[in-house]
Image: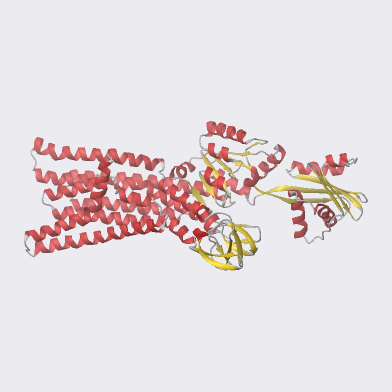
Amino acid sequence: MTEHSLSHMAAAETSAPRLSALLSQDRLERAFVVLTALNIAASLLSERLGAPEPLTLLFNLLAYFFGGTFGVIEGVKSLLEREINVDLLMVLAATGAAIVDQWHEGAILLFLFSLSNVLQNYAMDRSRNAIRALLKLRPDKATVRRGDSETVLPIEALQVGDVVLIKPGERLPVDGEVVGGSSTVDQSAITGESMPVSKQVGDEVYAGTLNQNGSLEVRVARHASESTLSRIIKMVESAQESRAKTQSFMEMFEQRYALFVILAVALYIVLPPLLLGVDFNENFYRAMVLITVASPCALVISTPAAILSAIANAARRGILFKGGAYLEQMATIKAVAFDKTGTLTTGKLSLTDVLPNGIARAELLRIVASAESRSEHPIALAILAAAKAEDVPIQAPQDFEAIPGQGIRATLDSARILVGTERLMRAEGLTVPPEIRAACDKLEAEGKSALIAYHSQLGWLGVIGVADTLRPRAAEFVQALRAEGVQKIIILTGDNRRVAEAVAAQVGADEVRAELLPSDKVTAIKALKQTYGKVAMVGDGVNDAPALASASIGIAMGAAGTDVALETADLVLMADDLSRVAYAMRLSRQARRVVMQNIAFSLGVIVVLVVSALGLNLALPLGVIGHEGSTIIVVLNGLRLLTYR
């Protein structure tokens, strides 16, 4: 495997000129392969027809030039960096064949070696398609409203605060906030969500997403170069350029192994003729076969072929690994720590219980919602949202007062309304009846916030329950982690213990550590690492940043548009989907299996070919076919991960 082939696979295109340059070099390499084959054919034909020897030699030299140019360039580069790569081994083998007047076999070696590189580049190009697809998602221009006029501008010219007009069927050019119109937006390219998401005024939208059936006016929130899409492109590029531990080892191994092969072949060239009296030319030819089949092409490419394919697979599903090392480590995780709020739960309060006391349920909800209608507190907003969803009529109170940490006072139809905690009732000189207190205790035991409702004319109206609701199927996804071999699942939260334990009971966590500061979470992660080894931390990437950084793998969930998450975490889930943690583990394990398959196969082929070269007089062209064929098989096996589900 050549060094320039590896560089092609490791680098993702970040600009049109860079992509164009890469494609130009690919085209040149393909053209050189064809010209090599044509000159080999011309050489054979001229020899058969008895043409002058200088003409045959010219065809041979041209075949060597076109077949060996890129190998020589990369071989020289490696020598200047005091390294030895596979290209150098191939060039030396072809040069040796020419020395013993085996021009045709040397040319065939260069032809098959360069053809192998072209085929590898073509195959590995599929793993770069994730980046190319992302680049295509970004429009070049946008329609901007400035004053009373509309102007079409390059997206690089857009300023924060500009209002961009998005028509049905257009992709959004920037991250921003909807300030006019409504529509549904396909966010699958960014978050991996399968269903379109409804967007209204005030909602956030992302560059690269597809507007569907309505028109939108979007206020630009970030420059084009700082959009979520741009950062995703940079992250996947960085991940493809980084090295997994196995890959780094293989690259170090290549240097030492290549040096060993050269020294061993040099000794093989000299010693048998001196000590055993064998024919020098025949022995030299055998040495050239040996240097060819012993080259570790398939071994070197075995890891990047699989790792890059897995990274591309994950990226298409909104799972962004920041490097091959994290992809490898994901398979070794034995303990997972979850933040609670915004991770296992939605992070948004909702009405869960309406427990009336002597009145109709709808009436209790009507009175409480009306009393809370002037409040901006998250609890009040949850109650109002539920009342609107049930078409409960809401009237504005005559008077309203919020008591921080306790609840609200309001006047409704000349009656005094209290909605809040038992502490508020005591402050108002009221004693909460046992049945009301029992209802509160029950809700609080379930991890919910209980609000008591009192009416100066009707008395105790009942109890309202509000909670940060669990994500749908959260328990199922936690169990999926256990199925992947996770031994310990723990919740780390700054929330109170009663609420945290209620969530733990619902999802099936093993342990809860509540009322923690960010530094306490870091301490807990370190303790887990001492007990279980590799530990993953799943959080929202904001207040969990220290814990994410200290875990073996920090996983930021629902991170689309979140700067801290994209910077801090090792693995970023663009959507609020816990199932992707288990998917990332399965993908990691599959990638490791493919890498091991590739390494075992590559080593096996090298052993068989070396034995055949030494003991069975393997011909050079057959050795090249076996050697390069094994490399192609390894690449194709790695590319299977692109379609893994």
In the foreground, 618 or 555: 555
Q: Is residue 518 above or below residue 57?
A: above
Residue 216 quadrant: bottom right
Residue 588 position, x and y percent, is 47, 46
Q: Is residue 415 left or right of residue 346?
A: right
Colour mode?
Answer: secondary structure
Q: Measuring 31% from the left and 44% from the top, which residue is drawn there?
A: 603
Q: Residue at x 91, y 40 (%)?
A: 429
Residue 326: horizontal and vertical position, in percent?
47, 43
Instruction: List x then y, in percent, for residue 575.
Output: 57, 52
Relative to 450, is 10 on the left or the right?
A: left
Question: Which residue is farthest right?
Answer: 457
The correct choice, above or below, for 240 with respect to 498 in the image is below
504 or 252: which is nearer to us? 252
- Is residue 270 visible in the rendered image? The answer is yes
On screen, residue 518 above or below 11: above
Q: Position of residue 474 (x, y in %)?
A: 62, 48
> Which residue is more in the foreground, 290 or 450?
450
Do we see residue 84 in this rendering? no
Q: Is residue 313 left or right of residue 476?
A: left
Residue 547, image quadrant: top right
Q: Quick one: 627 or 466, which is closer to the camera?
A: 466
